[in-house]
Image (cartoon, rainbow, N blue to C red):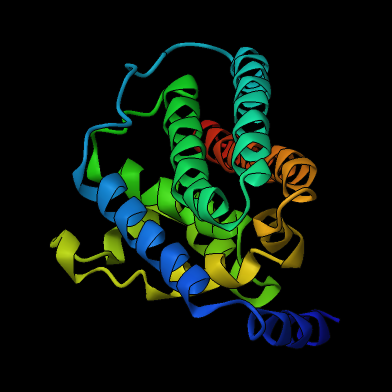
Amino acid sequence: LDTVSRKVQEKLNGYIPDKVHNAITIAIKQMIRGVLFGAKYITKKPVLGRSLEVCDIAAEEKIKIYQKTAAAEGGVTGAGGILLGLADFPLLLGIKLKLLFDLAATYGYDVKEYQERLFILYVFQLAFSSRQQQRLTYQHIANWQETVSTLPTDINQLDWQTLQQEYRDYLDIAKMAQLIPVIGAPVGFVVNYRLVRKLGNTAKNAYQLRYFQKSGC
């Protein structure tokens, strides 16, 4: 089923203008560099010593806030047609990344550390990729200490081409409909809301997994 849906997705992507694909690719490249090298998303210190239940409650509150922000942004840019619709991609990426950085701090992880920034990118990839790639990415997250030990010490040697391609292909025709005037506003509102929820749930599950691994459960 995943193979079939993947082929349909690839066919749909063939109808999307090159400038849209290029805009998304550029935005993703900038996102990755921002996570690995930038400091714009680091706003809070990690909160330590809290139970998993308290962390989950705090995380859920943050996800809901970011959902509303992303939905409002998607509605505004979607109403403007293709030009503002194209602007939505980097804006939405920024919202998603800010959420991930905040969730990392909520669960007690310091995103100033190189390893935690990489973990954020793996979570992002787990949320927005094909089933096949999700299985591979999940193994990296489920065996994080082993994954970290195999990563290159030079951050410039990391290859994130797969993440760029997978995320671009994940953005289905519903998201592209946001570029169409009139219908773009409601589509942008709903799709952004759901995309942020998906990312938030994926991040919660990933940090819960690390919590249980650390506690030996």
Q: Quadrant of the C terminus?
A: top right
User: Considering only vertical position in the picture, is 63 above or below 137?
Assistant: above
- Is 9 rendered above or below residue 203? below
Q: Position of residue 6 (x, y in %)?
A: 73, 82
In-front residue for pair 217/40: 40
For the point 82% across and 87% down, the residue is 4
Choose top left, top right, bottom left or bottom right for residue 153: bottom left
Q: Is residue 160 above or below residue 90?
A: below
Q: Residue at point 24% right, 37% down?
A: 113
Residue at horizontal 58 percent and vertical 14 percent from the top: 51
Q: Does residue 58 appear to the left or right of 182 in the view shown? A: left
Q: Is residue 202 visible?
A: no
Locate the N terminus and report the quarter of the image it occupies.
Answer: bottom right
Left or right? Give the position of 90 relative to 88: left
Residue 18 drawn at (x, y percent): 49, 79
Residue at horizontal 22 percent and vertical 33 percent from the top: 39
Counting from the top left corner in percent of width and height, residue 157 is at 19, 70
Residue 81 in view: yes
- Please give left or right for residue 6 compared with residue 89 in the image: right
- In depth, the one of 49 and 179 nearer the eye is 179
Q: Nearer the viewer, residue 105 or 176?
A: 176
Image position, residue 100 (x, y; %): 48, 36
